[in-house]
Image (tube, grey):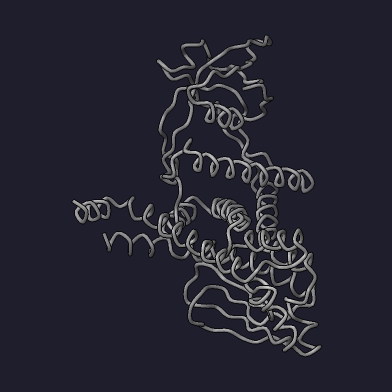
Amino acid sequence: MLRELIDLLWANGLAFVFILCVVVFIHELGHYLAAKRAGVRVEVFSLGFGPELFGWNDRSGTRWRVSLLPLGGYVKMFGESVATEGSSEERERAARTMTPEERDVAFIHKSLPRRAGIVAAGPVANFVLAWVVLAALFISVGRPFTAPTVGDVVPGSVAEQVGLQPGDVFVRAGGQAVHRFEDVQQIVAASADRPLKLTIRRGGNDLNLEVVPRRNVITDNFGNRREVGQLGVSHAGREFEKMSPGGALWAAGDETYQVAASTLQAVWQMITGARSADDLGGPIRIAQMSGQAAEAGLATVFWFLAMLSINLGLINLFPVPMLDGGHLMFYVAEAVRGRPLSERMVEYGFRVGLGLVVTLFLFVTYQDLSRFQKVVDFFRALVS
């Protein structure tokens, strides 16, 4: 089992480090640029955690460093710890001990909108990165486009039972207009075991059908297993549609929104129990997927980078203390109350946040390891 893990990380390590470092760097760069624009002194910009491997100081005194563990990063701003973790009493004490020059460059002494802007700039930078990368792909390689035309019908499937034929063109599904085969797949996947109305075009005539997509367990190209609804049809072919810069920017923005919305919907389904948490993965899973993306080509690497950037931006906006969204939640409370939260409330909040983050990390790591059957057998032996 250990050898399998070592081989996995070695084979996929370079792609993993490249993709994760780019996504994390842009996230932290968002914080950094927003802080500099607000006049805050940035003390450290670290790519990675743990001991410093190498680094340098710029003219403004910021220490730029590359650290041992490439699983994240951080920007340390002057006066930030008191502003994000301290109570109103601690902020008052810090204010009394700072010189006028220090107050001018301290995060703690910036207005609430500016502090919120600095915190939100990291996730926003991730969305911008995804938007730019996708736009570049749509211009250079093209946007994947699959016409909503039926190619083959699986014998014995729901599609065959309702009379779908090769050459049929989907016009509407579930009351929504469809333009690509992927639109149909997305609607059908979310409608397992539920009646779904379809409008198809055959020989110039529109036909209305009602189907009940069959629930099936599928495994995608990255090994993720999930339950989805299926009709039993395949598309007639896939093309790449190159776009103009203006069209690419618009399409990339729409794609970023759609991916973010789908991710939030999946998270909500996991919370409510409507969807299994087996799709979740941690660093090992990301490393494996990075390697598979690298094998598929450079365009796939950047596509995966964009998807990971969107997910990192979303996760950091969750209202959990320790994450950017948790800080923003505290700022909303401060705006409503007219003063920061008490020391006890802040302390409890960060304890809960730390517990949630650690629990999630342990869970996704176990999910990663459980994909190796020997690990599963080992844990079963411990409890049996």
Residue 333 place in picture, x, y as percent: 70, 60
Q: Residue at x 47, y 19 (%)?
A: 153
Q: In this view, does 190 lie above or below 378?
A: above
Task: Answer with left or right where residue 327 lies relative to residue 66.
Answer: right
Q: In this view, does 196 lie above or below 338?
A: above
Q: Is residue 374 above or below residue 121?
A: above
Indicate the position of residue 15 as horizontal and vertical percent values: 49, 61
Left or right: 288 in relation to 142: left
Image coordinates for residue 275, horizontal then vertical, percent:
47, 38
Residue 18 position, x and y percent, is 53, 65
Q: Which of 170 and 348 is in front in this view?
A: 348
As displayed, is residue 183 above or below residue 120?
above
Q: Look at the image and tell me in which quarter the N terminus lies.
A: bottom left
Q: What's the residue at 66%, 26% (across, down)? A: 178
Position of residue 144 in the picture relative to residue 50 (left or right): right
Q: Which of 247 and 190 is in front in this view?
A: 190
Seen at 54% across and 18% down, the residue is 195
Q: How many callouts does the rendering have? A: 0
Which quadrant would residue 203 be assigned to in this image?
A: top right
